[in-house]
Amino acid sequence: MIPAILIGYLVGSLPIGYLVAQRASGIDLRRVGSGNVGATNVYRTAGLSRALVVMLADMAKGAAAVLAAGGGASAVAA
């Protein structure tokens, strides 16, 4: 159980929105828009295509955490 918690924590702590905006546009999301590193602020500041990448990556992070905890594919779909 401890390894699953650590994996979930590490995966969840990745600031995907910040990384995508910084690499693609050179934008520091913490200093523009709402200051949030989520997909909505990426959309406002870097555009739709980058926001979709962030949204999908964030959803994958959540699914990865559930799978790491042993929830299985049925728990991800629920």
Image: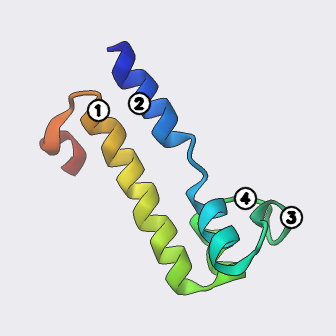
The amino acid pointed to by label 2 is: Ile
Q: Within the image, what quadrant is residue 67 found in?
A: top left
Residue shown at the point (42%, 33%) measured from the top left? 8
In the image, farthest residue toward the front: 23
In the image, farthest residue toward the top: 2
Instruction: Give the colouring mode of the picture.
Output: rainbow
In the rendered image, which residue does mark 3 sit on?
Answer: 31
Residue 72 to residue 47: above or below: above
In the rendered image, which residue does mark 1 sit on?
Answer: 68
The crowd level at tag 3 (other Cα within 10 Å; few <14, some 14-19, many 20+) is few
Location of residue 7 in the rendering, given as x and y in whole percent from the top left corner: 41, 30
In the rendered image, which residue does mark 4 sit on?
Answer: 36
The disc, 2 or 1, on the residue closer to the chain's N-terminal end is: 2
Q: CA distance from mark 3 to mark 1?
A: 33 Å
Q: Within the image, what quadrant is residue 43 found in?
A: bottom right
The amino acid pointed to by label 3 is: Arg
Location of residue 46 in the rendering, given as x and y in whole percent from the top left corner: 67, 81
The disc, 3 or 4, on the residue closer to the chain's N-terminal end is: 3
Q: CA distance from mark 2 to mark 1?
A: 7 Å
Location of residue 49 in the rendering, given as x and y in whole percent from the top left corner: 50, 84
Marks 2 and 3 close (CB-CB < 8 Å): no
The crowd level at tag 4 (other Cα within 10 Å; few <14, some 14-19, many 20+) is some
Q: CA distance from mark 2 to mark 3?
A: 29 Å
Residue 17 to residue 4: above or below: below
The amino acid pointed to by label 1 is: Ala
Residue 25 to residue 17: above or below: below
Location of residue 78 in the rendering, given as x and y in whole percent from the top left corner: 21, 47
In the rendered image, which residue does mark 2 sit on?
Answer: 7
